[in-house]
Image (cartoon, rainbow, N blue to C red):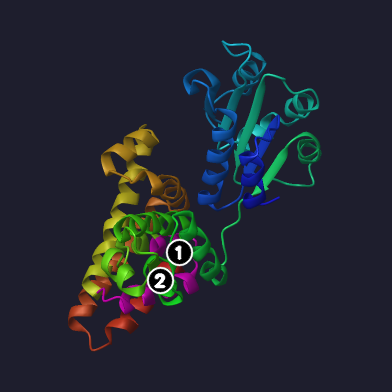
Amino acid sequence: MDIHPFKDLMNKGKSFPVYVFYGDEEFFINEALCAVKANSLKDTDTSLALVEFKGDETPGGVIFDELRTRPFFASKNKLVVVEDADEFVEKNRENLEKYIQTPASHASLVLVCDKWDKRMRLATLVDKVGVSIECKKLKDHLLPNWIPTRAKHYKKNISSVAVQKLVEDVGNNLAIIDKHLEKLSIYLGEKATIDERDVDALVGVDRSRTVFELTDAVAQRNVAAGLKILSQMLTHGEDSVRIISLLAWQIKRLWRAKQILKQGGDEHKVTSELQIVPFFAKRFFEQVKLYTEEDLMKKHALLLETDVKSKTSSFGTQLLLELLVYKLCV
């Protein structure tokens, strides 16, 4: 089952004792979570009926105890949500299998995972009594179909040219596209169709996204993706000095994050000191793990070297930047 029929089931009031949401598209995972919460917690006090845990921080016994404990009001059901649940699943697989065979009648369990092996006995048991939803990142070629459908959620149409412009400016980030569609729908008022001029007026190039995506591609050693994002930045008028300074800024933030964690600080301290935007927090810390301090030192040196060459060398700016991205990725 994918997200769309699942949301239909939730809208019809269907409920399950266990839900598993997994995959690499956070927007769809959030949509699934919102749907199950809206269905399970309607007409209830969420402070009493909703319990949320971090699976990589909470002992399994605490979560199972919560599932077995009845809510304060016997007539109300409880929703127990475990985010970042991969470690919890791995450590408590046998107990989960036993629980799912005789789940609590007064509680529903939601597991939010990065990965979910459908070959597991646990996955088979989940599918017998509950539901698992794979939330896959949307392929680029599917965006022109998804965006008009999402625009209808805000009671708007959108022209094909505006769709293309939105994709060029924002890229394949459904959460950010959705926020722009919401903003455009408010801006347009009674106007029924979003056109290219509306996108030009309100969207523009999302610089925080492009530099974040570029450092993400570098962290993944993905040369092709890095060059594609660089091309988008250059097409939209970013100059070499700004691109290099943005990359240096992000590299320094990753470096500082590693220092804070090395000194005993936690992710909350990093987020607070570096003012990490909540939407980017999870992927920021994934980048932190992918880099070593030595990596970051070398990449910062490459940025300084390219900055000097951009001001003194006879090489073309685009070629210098492409060489930079290549060297950063290898």
Q: Amino acid at mark 2?
A: Ile
Give above or below for 153 relative to 304: above
Res 181 quadrant in image: bottom left
Q: Residue 225 in magenta?
A: yes
Specify the principal SS of the magenta part.
helix
Q: Residue at x 33, y 54 (%)?
A: 186
Name the N-terminal-most of marks 1 and 2. Answer: 1
Residue at the extreme left? 311
Q: Secondary structure at mark 2?
A: helix
Disc 1 or disc 2, which is closer to the eye? 2
Residue 16 in the figure: left or right of residue 11: right
Please state the horizontal and vertical placement of residue 27, each as a whole percent of the image. Answer: 50, 50
Q: Which residue is mark 2?
A: 229
Q: 246 or 98: which is nearer to us?
A: 98
Residue 211 in the figure: left or right of residue 79: left
Give above or below for 97 relative to 284: above
Please state the horizontal and vertical placement of residue 139, each as a whole percent of the image. Answer: 57, 66
Q: Amino acid at mark 1?
A: Ala
Q: 156 or 141: which is nearer to us?
A: 156
Are the residues flagged by discs 1 and 2 in contact, CB closer than 8 Å? yes
Please state the horizontal and vertical placement of residue 115, each as a whole percent of the image. Answer: 64, 47
Please state the horizontal and vertical placement of residue 109, each as a whole percent of the image. Answer: 65, 29
Q: Residue at x 47, y 20 (%)?
A: 47
Q: Which mark is residue 217?
A: 1
Q: Residue at x 71, y 40 (%)?
A: 131
Q: Start and end of the magenta stretch? A: 213-238
Residue at the extreme front? 190
